Amino acid sequence: MENNINNPEIINDIIKINNDRIEGYRKAIDLATNHGLDKLLPTFQNCIEQSNEFIAELTPYVELEGKEPTDSTMLSGKLFRVWMGIKVNITGDDERSLLETCEQGEDAFKSTYQTVLAEGSNELSQHVHSLINTQLSKQLESHNIIKMMRDSKKI
């Protein structure tokens, strides 16, 4: 029998990592702008838009369980806390170091999604599990773009 009930705490953890990603890329946009790296802005903005889309897709499943979707970030939590440290510590003043930091954030995002898919799947409906898996696939495409951009920069 298929599970039709979703654990809103797990979905809110996914929303939190998306909020973290949005905040991280806002910081990256500020740094890129301050360092004249304007060519990075469209890619960073696309990542923000992607996370906003992911949140919009997940929100109804929290509300269906009678809970409020979070607007907070993962300052603490069992799934993954790395991104907050990364976004606070973005200090590189060159394109490669900024992209490296963004890639680390993408890795944290990926890890959270993978943990939810592996450990929380029995608390999610098949539809939400599939949605999270689809979002992870889309994020991996963004991750690969960031990685390719980083790799194209000389050390």
Image (cartoon, rainbow, N blue to C red):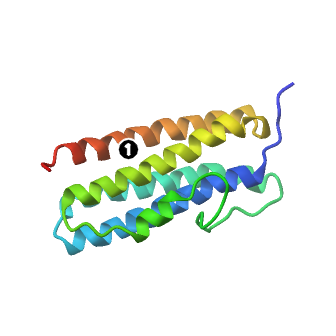
Residue at (63%, 33%) from the top-left corner? 130
Q: Image quadrant for the N terminus?
A: top right
Q: Nearer the viewer, residue 58 or 112?
A: 112
Residue at the front extreme of this rendering: 155
Using residue 86 as the reference point, say whether residue 148 is left or right of it.
Answer: left
Residue at the left extreme of this rendering: 154
Vertical order, 149 against 41 (above or below): above
The quarter of the displayed image where residue 139 is located: top left
The quarter of the displayed image where residue 62 is located: bottom right
Amino acid type shown at disc 1: Ser
Residue at (82%, 28%) from the top-left corner? 2
Residue at the right extreme of this rendering: 1
Crowd tier of the residue under label 1, counting other residues whose Cα lies within 10 Å: few below 14, some 14–19, many 20 or above: some
Q: Which residue is mark 1?
A: 142
Vertical order, 29 against 61 (above or below): below
Residue at the top extreme of this rendering: 1
Residue at (50%, 58%) from the top-left corner? 82
Using residue 85 as the reference point, say whether residue 71 is left or right of it.
Answer: right
- The mark tally for this picture is 1
Q: Position of residue 46 (x, y in %)?
A: 37, 53
Vertical order, 128 against 20 (above or below): above
Q: Position of residue 54 (x, y in %)?
A: 55, 50
Using residue 32 as the reference point, say whether residue 24 is left or right of it.
Answer: right
Q: Position of residue 30 (x, y in %)?
A: 31, 72
Q: Position of residue 97 (x, y in %)?
A: 25, 58
Q: Secondary structure at mark 1?
A: helix
